[in-house]
Image (cartoon, grey):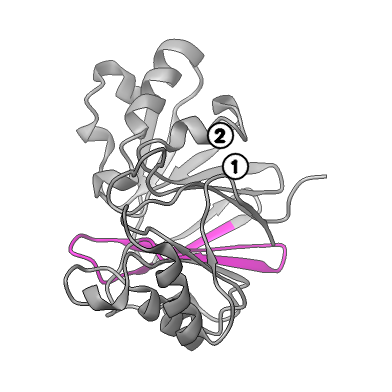
Amino acid sequence: MTDLLSLTVLGCDGSYPGPGGSCSGYLVRGGGTSVWLDAGPGTLARLQEHVTLAELDAIVISHEHVDHWSDLEHLAVACHYVLERPPVPVYCEADLISRLRVGPAAESLAWNPIGPDSRLQLGPLTFTFSRTDHPVATLAVRVDAGGRSLGYSADSGPGWGLERLGAGLDLAVCEATFTSDREGTLSHLSGRQAGLSARSAGVRRLVLTHQLPGTDRHAVRAEAEAAFGAPAELAEVGRRYQL
């Protein structure tokens, strides 16, 4: 039986991978369709623990910061020189394919530009987007399938909130990069701000991601729960959420 909608964490470290970690990356699946959502360093290896590269249908990248897409280079090499599969569609605002340092292997990926008004249908999965508060053009992502919905904040400062993804989010994966004492130092959210955003959006279940290595993750969660008014979870590599 195939999933109606699920998300598996492939990486959840913020900005750079900590010891044994990997940066932003998630596997979204539904109805036999498999989509790699952000492809940060270390996530390609984790992806293959759940699907083969031949089974990968598409890739959605939230923005051009390298901690969200650098493993595309390794995928291109694998697809071009080893698998010889048809080009994998990559959906992103920025043309990341032109930046790859892999020579002719870049031809194994095909860039498809998207923006905040785009609506993307991949099998039974419907992707919609919202521009966040970040120094480069960054798209938060909503995925709907089978009457279920999940939201992914990507990277954002407090000038954007999860409510921009629409009502009825069953699961929100929201960046919570640090604790509240660092608010305003970078265009990212603290645990407190993530909790407030989720509460405002009426999110049913909150998962916190993108903590900077060395950050007290449990303090981030405590701040988020106090602001959210309900339990929150810390993203963990390999954790799968079935909606």
Q: Residue at x 50, y 80 (%)?
A: 225
Instruction: Inspect the magenta stretch and tell me whether residue 7 lies in it.
Output: no
Q: Is residue 51 left or right of residue 17?
A: right
Q: Is residue 17 above or below residue 151?
A: above
- Amino acid carrying label 2: it is Leu
Q: Is residue 216 above or below residue 160?
A: above
Instruction: Inspect the magenta stretch and tell me whether residue 149 lies in it.
Output: yes
- Amino acid carrying label 1: it is Ser
Q: CA–CA distance between discs 1 and 2?
A: 5 Å
Residue 135 image point, x, y percent: 18, 64
Q: Is residue 59 above or below residue 173?
A: above
Q: Is residue 58 left or right of residue 29?
A: left
Do tag 1 and tag 2 residues touch (Cβ < 8 Å)?
Answer: yes
Q: Residue at x 28, y 46 (%)?
A: 16
The magenta stretch spans which residues?
Answer: 126-154
Question: Which residue in the rendered view is the most extreme toward the right?
Answer: 1
Q: What's the magenta bit mostly, secondary-structure-wise?
A: strand
Determine which residue is flagged by label 2: 56
Q: Secondary structure at mark 2?
A: loop
Residue 28 image point, x, y percent: 57, 50
Disc 2 crowd, CA 10 A, few/some/many (<14, 14-19, 20+): some
Q: Residue at x 28, y 34 (%)?
A: 97
Question: Which residue in the rendered view is the most extreme toward the top?
Answer: 81
Residue 104 picture quarter: top left
Residue 155 image point, x, y percent: 32, 62
Q: Quadrant of the C terminus?
A: bottom right
Q: Is residue 221 left or right of residue 154?
A: right
Residue 34: give its label: 1
